[in-house]
Image (cartoon, rainbow, N blue to C red):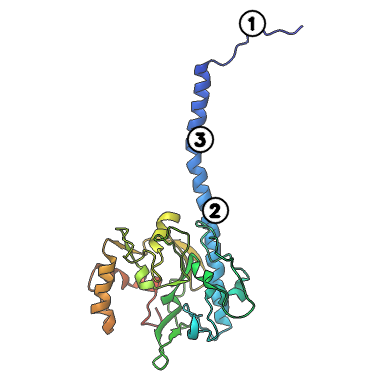
């Protein structure tokens, strides 16, 4: 015959609540650790994607007389038939169309799919990438006769390990994970802290949310791919102010537009420093 021992008793309500409280405390301690581990894993994937893309750029240059591919490749600038963007131009080297997005944001759903015709133009989905090419880091100036941009050469660049060619971006205006295939490095070096959609670095075609990507996805660091083929998270590479639009316009209007590249406000002092100018690149100097 089986029976319950008179010395055996069940949990009391207080004991059960204590166990639940302990589990809750442990969960509260561990969940942030899991979140950090998840973010670190995504960051590792992003760095790998950056590296594969910039190495593809190096291989392209090896096959193209040492020159970078043009970051703006639409229409007559590159392909008179229909144009092509970086993801298409570098596909023979990357063999992937899934490495042009930051893993923190994931790959967005492209309306109509991501078609890959064997010839001609692949489609506007190529402009949605969140790993965006640095316009200043791939080209400089323009040809005096044609007015077209002049691609950089690798041997003619002073600090290939310092010049960022590819960076993570985020589109804060439409609140999507979309970005842009290229951006203007001068504008990217300035970040408006007032969240105005009309300020620099806030989602238009040339300022595709570099500061937002750093803040939202990489703890303030800039996921960067460099001209020599390495990739890293860099910090402190952007000037933050509430009036980036005003400061950049002031400098362009009074200095840059007339070829006088000297600082005249806080932002241009920052941008024109040696460290910053070799990171963001310039369009007026083939070596920086």
Q: Which residue is mark 1?
A: 6
Determine crowd level at label 2: few under 14, some 14-19, many 20+ residues with C-alpha closer than 10 A.
some
Mark nearer the N terminus (1 vs 2):
1
Q: Which residue is mark 3?
A: 27
The answer to whether any part of residue 132 appears in the image is yes
Position in image of residue 57 (x %, y %): 54, 75
Kindly check if marks 3 and 1 are in contact, taking CB atoms under 8 A apart as contact: no
Residue lying farthest to the bottom in this orientation: 145
Q: Mark 2 falls on what kind of element?
A: helix
Determine crowd level at label 3: few under 14, some 14-19, many 20+ residues with C-alpha closer than 10 A.
few
Position in image of residue 242 (x %, y %): 27, 61
Q: Which residue is mark 2?
A: 41
Q: Mark 1 falls on what kind of element?
A: loop
Compute the Cα span from label 1 to label 2.
54 Å
Residue lying farthest to the front in this orientation: 112
Q: Nearer the viewer, residue 224 or 196?
A: 196
Quadrant hosting residue 62: bottom right
Determine crowd level at label 1: few under 14, some 14-19, many 20+ residues with C-alpha closer than 10 A.
few
Kindly check if marks 1 and 2 are in contact, taking CB atoms under 8 A apart as contact: no
Quarter of the picture containing the C terminus is bottom left
Position in image of residue 188 (x %, y %): 37, 68
Mark nearer the N terminus (3 vs 2):
3
Q: Is residue 173 above or below residue 37?
A: below
Name which residue lies at 39% across and 92% down. Answer: 144
């Amino acid at each position: 015959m089986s029976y319950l021992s008179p010395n055996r008793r069940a949990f009391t309500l207080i004991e059960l609540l204590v166990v639940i409280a302990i589990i809750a405390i442990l969960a509260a301690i561990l969940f942030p650790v899991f979140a950090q581990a998840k973010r670190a894993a995504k960051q590792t994937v992003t760095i790998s994607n950056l590296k594969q893309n910039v190495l593809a750029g190096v291989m392209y240059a090896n096959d193209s007389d040492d020159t970078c591919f043009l970051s703006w490749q639409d229409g007559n600038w590159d392909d008179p038939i229909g144009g092509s963007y970086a993801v298409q131009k570098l596909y023979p080297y990357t063999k992937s169309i899934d490495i042009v997005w930051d893993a923190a944001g994931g790959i967005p759903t492209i309306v109509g799919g991501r078609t890959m015709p064997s010839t001609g133009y692949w489609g506007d989905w190529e402009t949605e990438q969140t790993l965006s090419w640095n316009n200043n880091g791939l080209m400089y100036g323009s040809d005096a006769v044609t007015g077209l941009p002049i691609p950089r050469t690798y041997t003619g660049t002073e600090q290939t390990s310092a010049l960022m060619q590819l960076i993570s971006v985020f589109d804060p205006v439409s609140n999507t994970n979309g970005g842009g295939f290229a951006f203007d490095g001068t504008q990217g070096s300035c970040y408006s802290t007032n969240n105005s959609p009309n300020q620099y670095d806030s989602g238009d075609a040339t300022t595709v949310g570099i500061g937002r990507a750093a803040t939202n996805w990489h703890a303030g660091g800039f996921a960067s791919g460099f001209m020599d083929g390495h990739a890293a998270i860099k910090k402190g590479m952007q000037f933050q102010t509430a009036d980036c639009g005003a400061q950049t316009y002031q400098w362009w209007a009074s200095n840059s537009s007339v070829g006088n590249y000297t600082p005249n406000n806080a932002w241009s002092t920052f941008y024109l420093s040696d460290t910053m100018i070799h990171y963001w690149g310039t369009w007026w100097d083939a070596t920086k």
